Image (cartoon, coloured by chain):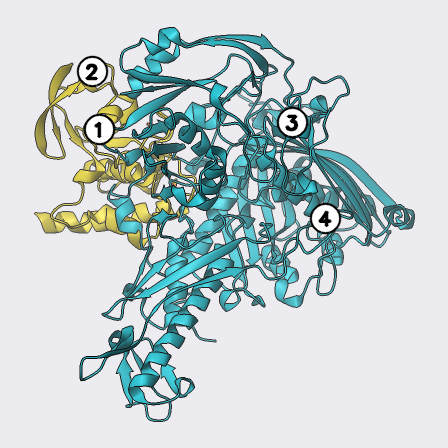
Chain colours: A yellow, B cyan
Amino acid sequence: MQSITVTINGEKKEIYFEGGETLLDVLRDNLYLTGTKYGCGQGACGACTVVVNGEAVKSCMVLFRRLEGAEILTIEGLSKNGELHPIQKAFIDADAVHCGFCTPGIIMELYALFTKNPDASEEEIKKALNKHLCRCTGYLPLIEAAKIAQKYYKESIGKEV
Amino acid sequence: MEYKYIGKDAKRPSAVERITGKAIFVDDIRLPGMLYAKILYPKYAHAKILSIDTSEAEKMPGVVKVVTGKNIKHPFGDCLHDRLPMAVDKVRYIGEPVAAVIADTERHARAALSKIKVEYEPLPVYTDALDAMKKDAVLIHEHSEKYFYVTPLYKPTPGTNIAITYEIKKGDVKKGFKEADVVVEDEFNFHHMSSVAIEPHATIALHHLDGTVEIWTANVGPFAVREQVAEFFGKNISDVRVHIPHIGGCFGYKSDPGIEPLVAYIASFVPGRPVKLRLTRKEDFTSTFIGRGIRARVKVGATKDGKLTALEETLYLSTGAYADTGSNILIVAVQTSGGVYYFPNAHVKGYSVYTNTPPVGALRAYGHPEAEFAIERIMDMLARKLDMSPIELRKKNYITDGKTNVVGEKFKKSDGDLFKCTESVLEAIPPKVEVKEDENYLYGVGYAGLIKAPKAATFASKGCHIKFNVDGTVSLNMAGGDVGQGLWTVARQIAAEALKMPPEKIKVYNEIDTQYSPWEWQTVGSMFTFQGGNAIIRAANKAIDALKRNASLVLKRDPDMLEYDGEYVYDRSYPDVKVAVKDICRGYVTEDGTTIGEVVDVTSYFRLPGVQGPDPETGMGRTGGSYTMGFQGCKVKIDKRTGKVYIDHFATSIDVGKVIFPKGAEAQVLGGVLMGIGETLMEEVRFKENGEIANPDLIRYKLPRIEDLPGKQTVKFIETPDAVGPFGARGLGEHPMIGVAPAILNAIYDAIGYDFKEVPVTQDMVKKVLEEKGLTVKDKEE
Ligand code: FES
Ligand code: FES
């Protein structure tokens, strides 16, 4: 067993693990943060996407032991005080949540994109979404949701300040 | 008719859970004392097992038990009992479980796998039905004569690799071909693909010490899982309980019992301890059901003015190592061979043949895309031979009011209007391409009809349990799995309409439990809206009748003089003589405190009326019951340099009878069309000669991404009310996939003048044809 200290969803924690685990393994199996999903383990589907130090990463491709001091945000950390995050609201309004298995990863991807660049172009949005596989929606509802999410997100930054 | 909730957009009841990461899928479940299983797979796709030595593995850290198939007493199944949860004395495909390790952690279980020693004697491997059918082929099942089958329809042919044979005869094909002026004949091949839900399979099983079994799994057939597991262990069905949490997509391969019997078998070695098996993506490809895999040899005849006279066809399904689940796919393909066309004479025969691949099981619209691919391609070829527009030829031969399909089912006006569907697709994508070629691209258009019936067991039913709560709200329980298609939303809308109350007052179930949920066959065949919707209406009416009976005691009126509006039951002529629903839903407490009347808590069921199994002699019969038809078309552009096929515009028009949940319905089409594009241009489970799968991962097996979207999609619903469907609605979920492959291949022909006869058609295949035909251009800069 070894341990490192990371901040997960705003809480600083010392986390014990065996050694070879990916971030996805630790999130799901050690920390029971099961909102992050396994779909392929090879970086191909995006279901495991979380935000590490502000960047969207595929947690199945990251060795946990490399993350000393990292700030990790998962889908569980997105809604605050019982309020859905604007991106989550947008997905509901656009009816883009079908089976919902790909959804947490996609939302985290967009969160990273919009926090870095609230004015991301449609091309940039599609490029980010192209990293994700969704078998249900045919993607158009996701693109629609992402656009609404961008709008809601921009409105919300005004409010937070 | 004006509806209040039907046909209006609605919020999905499960959305918040799913959007916050709180929705519980099987792999998110942890039970106290839970153990983990990992599976050992064979080195060969077909081999005798000579010996298995588990002794070293048993000594590994954390290992609780090593399990082999030697305790299995008999095979199991649904229609043909030829399945085994784990190999017994031979392996028949590369993903077949040979042994399992149960350990305290998955890591420990995995580590012990490599210590299991197995000796094999390899046998010849067949991955194609035609090879397995050869006279000298080695038998994959040596004793298929011993297998139990439910009806002679599923009887294997012992001494061969043919699992089942099914044949239909309509009219006189000989005569039909004599009447024909033109005959076209060809062979088409639909390769295997995988459902690839983004959630891989996972199951937990627990044998309680009292002999009961509990299972948690991602499957839309919980009652089928329960029945087959009970039968396998010789237990009462009531002693097996199956829980279905959220399901991360199905697309077919989570609808028949899959890994559940395996996990139940493994867990039986550690009574009292729950055992979880979660498949990796690779295992999800190699060890669960795959789909498609049908070869069709088709011959059609027509008069010179384009009237079809005869269809003769033979279908070969490479059904994989076990034929139970593939049997129905073959049967459905045979029954669908005529597509949307009227053939006065038809003779169609199908073989489901054992091969050394994973078993073929359900995959969105199974049997239909394969058969309709062949017929829709050959219609285009026939049109060319007749020098007639393919649209004209199609319209001339549509099954319409009073005509029969190849199994002799008569169509009615209320089955839908194919002509309207055709018109709306042609409006979006006109049949003539303005510019056929420019510097970089070749352009073409293509079309295909589509038709599908549920093709379910005749006893297939759905149930609905309505419980009125004392505040006048309603709890709605059913057993339909919402795998993303929006089933819970549709259920709530139909219930709201039928119970005349806002959807917010109706709480829809979000998990299924065979102990509490009303019985349902399986959530398959695009049947939920049709059957489930009718079950809801029946239950709602039963509840309303009960409320009226209660109100009649209170208001002193005959029940049929009373009206119900969702909040009150009142006297039809004096509406202010009324009683609130909330005061009578558990009986009515009178002034002196005694309670009168009944508790309003009802259950109703619905099955397709009049559906039959096929006649054992002729193969004919009313096997569909409820059809949905439509038309699809596309415009493609083909890159002359790379051979890449771009879909510029894809249009779908389906006569759904009545749209219940508009956004959901549209998304079913968008998702279905994209999945269809996947199976047409990129998706294939590829087998090496030795039966290994060449691409069991999401890097080499390509799934459509955003970049593969058509430039434009048009979706148009026609609403010819169905005679039986709830509010006139028909099934829709699987249909949008059916016409995609032939429409695209017909369009490719239009663009480059080459007939592809198999799918997928990859970029390399197109490029090769372009080169052969001298249609490529080289980059000038080169
Ligand atoms: S599970 Fe990480 S990308 Fe698929
Ligand atoms: S919503 Fe099911 S995979 Fe995307």
Q: Residue sitting at 54 percent across and 41 percent down?
A: B676
Q: Residue sitting at 14 percent across and 49 percent down?
A: A82
Above or below residue B490? Residue B232 is above
Q: CA distance from mark 4 to mark 2?
A: 60 Å
Answer few, some or many: residues within 10 Å of disc 1's Cα (few below 14, many 20 plus, some between 14 and 19).
Answer: many
Q: Amino acid at mark 3?
A: Tyr
Instruction: Respond whether the residues carrying marks 2 and 3 are from the same subunit.
Output: no
User: Residue B376 appears in which quarter of the rendering?
Assistant: top right
Answer few, some or many: residues within 10 Å of disc 3's Cα (few below 14, many 20 plus, some between 14 and 19).
Answer: many
Q: Which mark is residue A27?
A: 1
- Pinpoint residue A124: horizontal percent, then vertical percent: 32, 37
Determine the residue located farthest toward the front in the rendered image: B210
Residue pointed to by mark 4: B338
Kindly check if marks 4 and 3 are in contact, taking CB atoms under 8 A apart as contact. Answer: no
Q: Amino acid at mark 1?
A: Leu
Frontmost residue, B249 versus B423: B249
